[in-house]
Image (tube, rainbow, N blue to C red):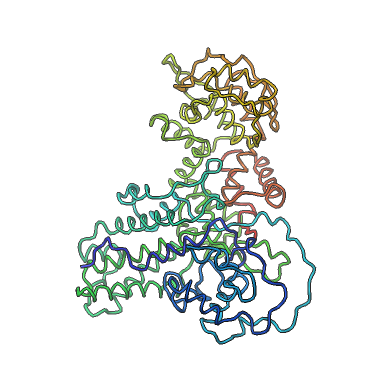
């Protein structure tokens, strides 16, 4: 009998391939990295091109172990129709990819430093069809081409990097794919194996920080195994499996009939189209068929009945693991539409299926649903009104609401691990109501909230999220005085103001002084250079006890009034937190900061504040302001409707 916990023998090859793909790299046409490798020699080599015999030796020594002697390995194929991340039809691009990423355990060892270099000869051997007989594809032109004036492509630093699903997106996508309920036991346990992600301004989907390591994909592997196990957890009979797969022909024959094979294939086709966020192709199907045949062979070798229930369950588990560990599932590969008539080959419109993926991940944190994919298939997502219609639908769904409650809480730096459950429930309720009811931007900082006092009484204060105990407690880091930690967060995260880089040589050890003494010391010239930027923003929280985060309206330890450092249109004095909340809620600088954050989040990358991104962001801010509806949902609609949302920068 086949043990259900057995991992399909060849699946680790996917992990090797994934670990060799640094998701922080940028992608060129066809999904090939650009911008990092040394350029190929400008002079044309002899007509024979790179030495294919050297390429063959390099491939067999370095590549065949994972890819197979002719690139035939089903988990990491190398052929023009199914090369996933790299471009297996272009010598220059494939050589560049090999130079940067291959082999996974010794990346950049196969160099690109001459016409018979490792990367170039290996790429030529692959493109030549794994033979040393020279073909036209690998011949270099015998006639030199006309030289052209070198030009510097505009705004190169807005290149769209190759991204991957975040941990939350990966788990949500698996649940969506397999229709697993929240709280599936093995999936919940496997979440502990996922590697902690880098956070930039509260969010984790910036592709520049999403390196794929062996530890990362090990976590993915455990999650895939757990998900396949949870999917089949209720199956103990032929009838259970037939119902789960919606395939009554299953197990009806003992001789390997096409009906049995077709049942598995039909189940797999549905998974692939959803998981890969695009229509499935013949190569996808052939890989699944090979998995099926391999499981049958394993079962035969073990001397088991060919089609017993456990054999079929093992097959389904292997298929699920194959799909959910595939680069097509984990990576977000955007190639855009090719327009040969366009003069700008560095800017392309995304395909409709790529737009559907961006929308679903941005607005719901999971795979595109059938409705979104149907409009993608019909070619309708290039239309802004169609995208807005889908945006409203996704934002109004339970999963959309949960997505943004979590994302907004993360952006606000609210740490669930250091606050009481009741306080987290209060902040979740505040954020959800603000988002769902389309509260204005100003309400985030000015809405009335119930504040608990040190005396045990409660009052209602117009301080919005700034006055919620979970927010205040999350920005308390002893022994650093709270006016520093809270002030730094407000200035850097909520106003997008860069902090000074240099710390004076005479910076003091705050542990020897009281917070009030530290505050006074910071007014000295050597400290004021930095601390004048954020100290007074944090001092506005002085009415909250530093240890309990409860409210004490009588507290004025730092003074009765503070002059806020001039940031954008904020240039005023404040006495209390509601003064700060009024200034923040009325500030164009603060609302633009929020717009910039969510614009960047939608693109999954850092943005260029000088070139194209800056212009597109300004258009977005203007559109949001002119709408007269400065709610969070209105901002998200403006982002989704923008041209930049459906644009790929190369």
- Say how many tags the image has: 0
Question: Image point 57% across, 16% down: which residue?
Answer: 516
**In which image quadrant can residue 262 be found?**
bottom left
Residue 507 can be seen in this image: yes
**In which image quadrant can residue 496 be found?**
top right
Q: Would residue 488 appear left or right of 566 to someone viewing this image?
A: left
Residue 613's spot in the image, x, y percent?
67, 50
Q: Nearer the viewer, residue 629 or 537?
A: 537
In the rendered image, the vertical position of residue 509 relative to residue 275, given as above or below: above
Residue 486's spot in the image, x, y percent?
55, 28
Question: Image point 49% across, 29% down: which residue?
Answer: 477
In the rendered image, the vertical position of residue 325 relative to residue 191, given as above or below: below
Residue 89's spot in the image, x, y percent?
58, 75
Q: In the rendered view of the protein, which quadrant contains the C terminus?
A: bottom right
Q: Residue furthest top?
A: 554
Q: In the rendered view of the protein, which quadrant contains the N terminus?
A: bottom left
Question: Image point 64% across, 35% down: which residue?
Answer: 499
Q: Would residue 492 appear left or right of 171 to someone viewing this image?
A: right
Q: Nearer the viewer, residue 272 or 538?
A: 538
Q: Would residue 276 appear left or right of 355 to someone viewing this image?
A: left
Q: Nearer the viewer, residue 222 or 554?
A: 222
Q: Residue furthest bottom?
A: 133
Residue 524's spot in the image, x, y percent?
68, 20
Residue 629 can be seen in this image: no
**In which image quadrant can residue 159 be found?**
bottom right
């Amino acid at each position: 009998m086949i043990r259900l916990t057995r991992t399909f023998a060849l699946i680790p090859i996917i992990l090797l391939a994934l670990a060799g793909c640094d998701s922080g790299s940028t992608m060129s046409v066809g999904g090939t990295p650009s911008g990092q490798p040394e350029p190929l020699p400008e002079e044309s080599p002899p007509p024979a091109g790179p030495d294919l015999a050297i390429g063959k030796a390099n491939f067999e020594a370095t590549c065949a172990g994972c890819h197979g002697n002719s690139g035939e390995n089903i988990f990491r194929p190398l052929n023009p129709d199914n090369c996933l991340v790299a471009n297996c039809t272009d010598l220059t691009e494939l050589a560049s990819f090999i130079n940067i990423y291959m082999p996974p355990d010794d990346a950049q060892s196969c160099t690109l430093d001459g016409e018979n270099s490792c990367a170039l000869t290996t790429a030529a051997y692959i493109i030549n069809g794994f033979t040393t007989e020279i073909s036209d594809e690998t011949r270099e032109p015998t006639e030199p081409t006309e030289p052209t004036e070198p030009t510097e492509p505009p705004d190169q630093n807005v290149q769209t990097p190759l991204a991957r699903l975040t941990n939350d997106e990966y788990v949500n996508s698996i649940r969506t794919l397999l229709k697993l309920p929240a709280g599936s036991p093995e999936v919940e346990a496997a979440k502990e194996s996922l590697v902690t992600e880098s956070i930039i301004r509260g969010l984790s989907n910036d592709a520049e920080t999403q390196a794929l390591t062996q530890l990362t994909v090990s976590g993915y592997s455990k999650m895939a195994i757990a998900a396949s196990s949870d999917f089949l957890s209720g199956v103990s009979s032929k009838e259970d499996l037939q119902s789960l797969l919606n395939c009554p022909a299953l197990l009806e024959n003992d001789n390997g009939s096409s009906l049995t094979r077709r049942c598995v294939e039909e189940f797999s086709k549905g998974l692939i189209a959803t998981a890969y966020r695009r229509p499935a192709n013949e190569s996808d199907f052939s890989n699944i068929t090979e998995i099926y045949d391999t499981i049958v062979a394993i079962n035969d070798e073990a001397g088991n009945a060919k089609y017993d229930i456990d054999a079929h369950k093992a097959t389904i588990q292997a298929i699920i693991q194959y799909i959910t560990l595939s680069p097509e599932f984990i990576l977000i590969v955007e190639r855009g539409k090719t327009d040969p008539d366009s003069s700008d080959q560095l800017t392309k419109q995304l395909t409709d299926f790529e737009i559907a993926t961006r929308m679903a991940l941005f607005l719901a944190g999971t795979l595109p649903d059938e409705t979104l994919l149907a409009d993608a298939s019909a070619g309708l997502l290039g239309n802004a009104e169609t995208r807005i219609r889908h945006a409203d639908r996704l934002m109004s769904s339970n999963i959309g609401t949960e997505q943004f409650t979590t994302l907004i809480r993360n952006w606000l730096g609210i740490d669930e691990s250091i606050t009481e459950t009741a306080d987290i429930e209060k902040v979740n309720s505040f954020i959800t109501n603000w988002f769902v009811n389309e509260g204005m931007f100003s309400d985030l900082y000015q809405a009335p909230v119930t504040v608990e006092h040190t005396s045990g009484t409660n009052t209602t204060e117009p301080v919005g999220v700034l006055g919620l105990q979970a927010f205040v407690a999350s920005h308390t880091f002893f022994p650093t005085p709270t006016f520093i930690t809270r002030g730094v967060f407000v200035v850097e995260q909520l106003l997008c103001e860069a902090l000074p880089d240099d710390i004076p040589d005479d910076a003091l050890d705050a542990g020897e002084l009281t917070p009030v003494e530290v505050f006074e010391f910071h007014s000295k010239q050597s400290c004021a250079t930095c601390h004048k930027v954020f100290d007074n923003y944090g001092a506005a929280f002085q009415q909250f006890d530093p240890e309990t985060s409860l409210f004490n309206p009588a507290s004025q330890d730092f003074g009765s009034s503070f002059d806020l450092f001039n940031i954008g249109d904020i240039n005023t004095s404040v006495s209390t937190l509601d003064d700060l909340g009024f200034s923040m809620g009325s500030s164009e600088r603060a609302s633009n900061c929020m717009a910039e954050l969510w614009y960047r989040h939608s693109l999954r990358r850092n943005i260029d504040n000088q070139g194209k991104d800056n212009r597109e962001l300004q258009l977005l801010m203007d559109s949001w302001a002119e709408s007269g509806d400065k709610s969070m949902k209105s901002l998200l609609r403006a982002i989704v409707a923008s041209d930049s949302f459906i644009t790929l920068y190369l």
